[in-house]
Amino acid sequence: MHGNQGRCSTHLPIVKRAILIVLAIVYLAFTAYAADIAGKWWVDTSAETASQGGRGGSVMGGEFDFKVTGDELSGSASAAGPHGQWMLVPITDGRITGDTVSFTVIRKDMAGNDYQSRYTGKVAGARIELTVDTGRGNPRTLTLKRPGSLPPRRSSMR
């Protein structure tokens, strides 16, 4: 009986340690996973027009060029500037965790003042579904797609 107690007491910590190691690996695998969104994405203006009741919002579109390092998201966005010209603006405060993405873009309004747009959403295969909140009321939704999955565009920044 003494021999079994000694064996069980040394065997139990090894089992606990093995279980903890497996749990740690599973946890790291889930937290380290991030959807691969690096590269160029275009606003799907046909989806945007439909989601805005046919009126669109900025149906001119836009382009996002994402850079991903771990769970950090950076890059640039192109969009119409205050006088209709295309401009590149940096993506800041970006994060990607699993299929959830969030970032901020700061643009200039017609008066030349900065205004911030906060983007949050989910990666869904070859699409990114985003909600854009400018802090000016009425957040809107955008669908981003890879350039090859959309019909040719009339105007874009390349």
Image (spheres, helix red, strand yellow):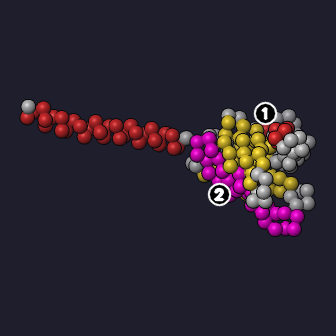
Residue 120 lies in magenta, yes or no?
no
Report the disc number at residue 149: 1
For mark 1, give the secondary structure: helix
For mark 2, give the secondary structure: strand
Residue drawn at 72 percent across, 37 percent down: 127
Residue drawn at 55 percent across, 41 percent down: 33
Estimate the spatial distance between the alpha carbons at disc 1 and disc 2, rounded to whole Å: 28 Å
Q: Amino acid at mark 2?
A: Asp
Report the disc number at residue 13: none
Residue 23 lies left or right of residue 97; in this view the side is left
Residue 61 lies left or right of residue 65; in this view the side is right
Residue 8, percent from left and from top: 18, 35
Residue 32 seen: yes
The residue carrying mark 2 is 93
Residue mark closest to the camera, 1 vs 2: 2
Identify whether 48 is placed above or below 111.
above
Residue 112 lies in magenta, yes or no?
yes
Read off the magenta span: 91-119
Residue drawn at 52 percent across, 43 percent down: 32
Residue 99, percent from left and from top: 62, 41
Identify whether 72 is placed above or below 144.
below
Residue 115, percent from left and from top: 78, 63
Q: Are marks 1 and 2 in contact (CB under 8 Å)?
A: no
In the image, 107 versus 41, the foreground residue is 107
Q: Earlier in the sequence, mark 1 or mark 2?
A: 2
Residue drawn at 88 percent across, 64 percent down: 110
Residue 64 lies left or right of residue 71; in this view the side is right
Local crowd size for mark 2, using a 10 Å CA cut-off: few (<14), some (14–19), many (≥20): few
Instruction: Tell me which corner region of the image, top left, top right, bottom left or bottom right, holds residue 3.
Output: top left
Residue 113 lies left or right of residue 5; in this view the side is right
Dominant SS type (magenta): strand
In the image, 72 versus 129, the foreground residue is 129
